[in-house]
């Protein structure tokens, strides 16, 4: 088992809902551990957000799930992360705190140069931002 921090379209109810992604691949349902935040900057790419880690940024809101290790390959495919290919998203590790417990999580930030000129989501919450846009 592994932990993943999701901040955008992989969150529950979003277009790439992590639970639905697991179900489509006949994998165990991810278990929600809790809400967490990571310091950074969130940008609007239109249909999805991009996260850039930044210790001086806002608290970007997301959810932590315990997942089957085999789901990582599915998430990599959704985020178009392939070995040896420097795409938009990257697979990284981050440690988050939930109720005083530390969790080492996989997450998918974007390349820093890719956000130039894009609107920043000051609230750090993609779901609330997307809903307010409608």
Image (cartoon, rainbow, N blue to C red):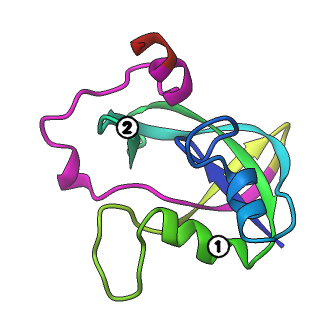
Q: What separation in Å lies between label 2 and label 1 (alpha carbons)? A: 22 Å
In the image, is residue 133 above or below residue 17? above
**Residue at the location (41% across, 81% down)?**
82
Q: Which residues are magenta?
A: 102-130
Local packing at callout 1 (Cα closer than 10 Å; few below 14, some 14-19, many 20+) is: some
Sequence order check, earlier mark of 2 and 1: 2
Instruction: Provide the residue designation for mark 2.
Output: 47
Q: Quadrant of the C terminus?
A: top left
In the displayed structure image, the side of residue 116 where residue 85 appears, left or right: right
**Quarter of the figure with residue 23:** bottom right
Local packing at callout 2 (Cα closer than 10 Å; few below 14, some 14-19, many 20+) is: few
Instruction: Provide the residue designation for mark 1.
Output: 72
**Residue at the location (50% across, 63% down)?**
78
Report x, y in % for residue 125. 52, 26
As for residue 111 lying within the magenta part, the answer is yes
Nearer to us in this view, 82 or 34: 82
As for residue 21 lying within the magenta part, the answer is no
In the image, is residue 107 above or below residue 72? above
In the image, is residue 131 above or below residue 12? above
In the displayed structure image, the side of residue 17 where residue 121 appears, left or right: left
Q: In this figure, what is the number of numbered marks?
A: 2
Q: Secondary structure at mark 1?
A: helix
Between disc 2 and disc 1, the foreground one is: 2
């Amino acid at each position: 088992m592994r932990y993943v921090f999701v901040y955008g379209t992989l969150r529950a109810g979003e277009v790439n809902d992590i639970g639905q992604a697991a179900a489509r691949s006949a994998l165990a349902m991810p278990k929600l551990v809790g809400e967490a935040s990571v310091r950074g900057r969130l940008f609007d790419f239109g249909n999805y957000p991009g996260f850039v880690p930044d210790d001086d940024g806002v608290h970007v809101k997301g959810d932590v799930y315990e997942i089957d290790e085999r789901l990582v390959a599915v998430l990599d495919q959704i985020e178009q992360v392939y070995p040896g290919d420097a795409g938009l998203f990257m697979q990284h590790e981050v440690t988050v705190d939930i109720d005083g417990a530390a969790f080492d999580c996989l997450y998918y930030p974007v390349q820093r140069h890719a956000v130039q000129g894009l609107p920043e989501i000051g609230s750090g919450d993609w779901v609330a931002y997307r809903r307010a846009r409608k």
